[in-house]
Amino acid sequence: MVRHIMIPSEENSTVSIPAEFFGTKVEVLMYPFDNKKASPDSDTINDIFDKHLYSFGDFRFNRDEANNYD
């Protein structure tokens, strides 16, 4: 797979095709790309995942309690 992001400066632009693609069927897609959508703010990501964080800092494993089958 080849992904090439560019800002064309004229109507005709060129993208090089790798040699391993010669003789194979390839698909070419073109659509406008907005950088803001591609890399969301880290604050937004943190807001989403912060509510799912749990700290095991105070957790102590008790082997006797874990193996008590009575």
Image (cartoon, helix red, strand yellow):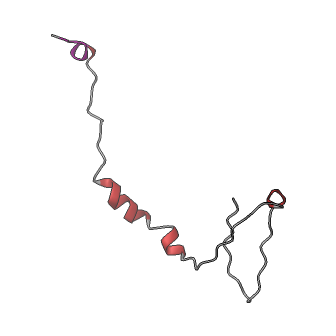
Q: Which residues are magenta?
A: 64-69
The number of numbered discs placed on residues in the rendered structure image is: 0
User: With respect to residue 64, does 7 lie above or below?
Assistant: below
Residue shown at 32%/54% (left/top)? 50
Which quarter shows the C terminus?
top left
Which of the 4 image quadrants contains residue 24?
A: bottom right
Q: Nearer the viewer, residue 52 or 33?
A: 33
Q: Is residue 40 left or right of residue 62?
A: right
Residue shown at 67%/80% (left/top)? 7
Residue shown at 80%/69% (left/top)? 16
User: With respect to residue 57, does 25 lie above or below?
Assistant: below
Is residue 28 located in the magenta-colored stretch of the structure? Answer: no
Instruction: Identify the residue at the far left of this view.
Output: 70
Residue shown at 20%/12% (left/top)? 68
Give the x, y percent position of residue 30.
Answer: 64, 77
Give the x, y percent position of residue 36.
Answer: 50, 74
Is residue 66 located in the magenta-colored stretch of the structure? Answer: yes
Instruction: Identify the residue at the far bottom of this view.
Output: 11
Give the x, y percent position of residue 22.
Answer: 83, 61
Q: Nearer the viewer, residue 64 or 27?
A: 27
Q: Is residue 8 left or right of residue 48?
A: right
Which quarter shows the N terminus?
bottom right
User: With respect to residue 6, does 41 lie above or below?
Assistant: above
Q: Is residue 66 left or right of residue 34?
A: left
